[in-house]
Image: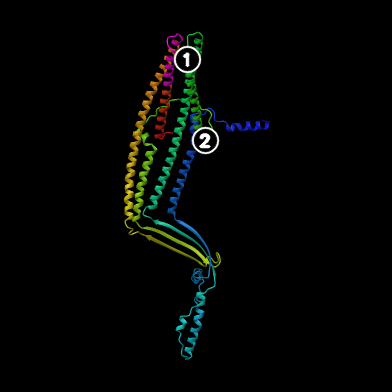
Amino acid sequence: MNIKTIFIFLIAFPLFAGMENLSLDQALKIVQKENLDIKIAQFDALMQKYETKIAQGHSFGKLDLTLQGMRSNDAGNVFGFKLQSREATFGDFGFDEFLGPLGGAIYGASQGIAPSDMSGLLNQQPKMLNFPEERNHYVSKLTFTMPLFTGGKLHNYRKIMHRMYELSKLDAKKVRNKKIFETKKTFHDISLVDNYIRNLSLIMTNINRLESVVENMEHEGYAKDIDLLEVQARKAEAQSMYEQAKLNRELAYQYLSFLLNREVSSIKPVSDVAPTPHVTQADISKNLDIQKALHGYEMATMGVNVERSNFLPQIGAFAEYGSADDKFLNEFGQKDFYTVGVQLKWNIFNGGMDKYALEKAKLKQMQAHDQAQLAKKGIALHVKKLQSEINTANANIKSYQAQYHFATKVYNNYHARYKEGMVSISDLLMKQSKQLEMLLQLLSAKNTRNYKVFELNSILNRG
């Protein structure tokens, strides 16, 4: 490896190094800013915010600028072009082909000449009207349309979209709470595994000492080969448990890095038993699922009002201003035009569809009301269940701690008695197995309790 390569490695090394000695408070701040799931949920909420703005825009009307350029030799189009450009003449009707013979007949009559039959003149097809020259036509106009009265449909539609925005914010907050819950749990899992590894290290130290004792006793003829093999087998079992615990800790660090969207190498330990949350009725009402259900009921109520609006007239205004000519924007003011109007549209009959849609909306409103009540009662029941499980886990932890301390003392007692030849190596290892069993039970109880505590905090909408 040359000097240049070493220099590049030393510069790049900090980029790959993980965060050291990370505290839980720091991790919670990072996860709320950097977690990808939280960012995606926030984008969803922001998009729904713009949907709300779009819904508001419908009430302010619509203004369109239209620029058209056309060319045609179609008789109807050409005459219409000239008329819209205010350039139509009698000549466009072929009056030059009609007035000549008519004028001659009038003059002859004035001179006492009997007029000839003029009926054929009316059947003559004017060439200028039927076969006009092709013509360009440019139209520039502004068109404004605006709803004046919709029976409350637009008003309730805006309110529904606003509620949907509120729901999207609750969804984003729910994702945020979940990631906070997972971050806290991972911190406590790592601290719990670290504690477990320390206890396993002490047990392995005791096994190593026991191995030395058995070897010495074997040399002196007080122990057998099988005794040493039993101790070595137990040592291999404890070593396997130790390595598995280290792998679990590494996996927990990888998951924490995934949550924070940055590498984490070590953390500041926290208590391996999370504090028990205090719960009140007001705390339960802050649950996001309850809030979402209440928003759903309000949206269903607005939906009923939307369906009711179908029984009322819809009134809108229309205004248009522009100009047309055979040249673009030519003589705009001299050839301008305008149109204004109001339209009322009222559906009288559509086969009862509006009636049935209204009844369906009312049923949906009643369903949403029951869903809100169900959410309140269901969350309250779930909270009580979690509190009961936490209390049970507290009792189990207290019991397993006492049993583990007792098992440790029993093992130490049997270890001393084994040196004196009062118990067999099998009896001693059985007591050590009991010690390991209680340690695992204690670890499992703490892990279960922490999970329930963080789940309860998440349900109570606590960050």
How crowded pointer 2 is (Cα within 10 Å; few <14, some 14-19, many 20+) is rated as some
What is the quadrant of residue 341 in the picture? bottom left
Q: Nearer the viewer, residue 246 or 226?
A: 226
Which residue occupies 35% across, 38% down?
375
Q: In the rendered view, would you say 317 is above or below 238?
A: below
User: Residue 418 location in percent, x, y?
Assistant: 45, 11
Give residue 226's mark.
1
Q: Nearer the viewer, residue 431 or 290?
A: 431
- Distance from the alpha carbon under mark 1 to that under mark 2: 52 Å
Q: Are marks 1 and 2 in contact (CB under 8 Å)?
A: no
Q: Give the residue at mark 2.
A: 261
Image-based side of 373 in relation to 437, left or right:
left
Q: Which region shows up in magenta? A: 417-437
- Please name the amino acid that badge 1 sits on: Ile
Q: Magenta stretch: residue 423 in it?
A: yes
Give residue 83's mark.
none
Which residue occupies 32% across, 40% down?
373
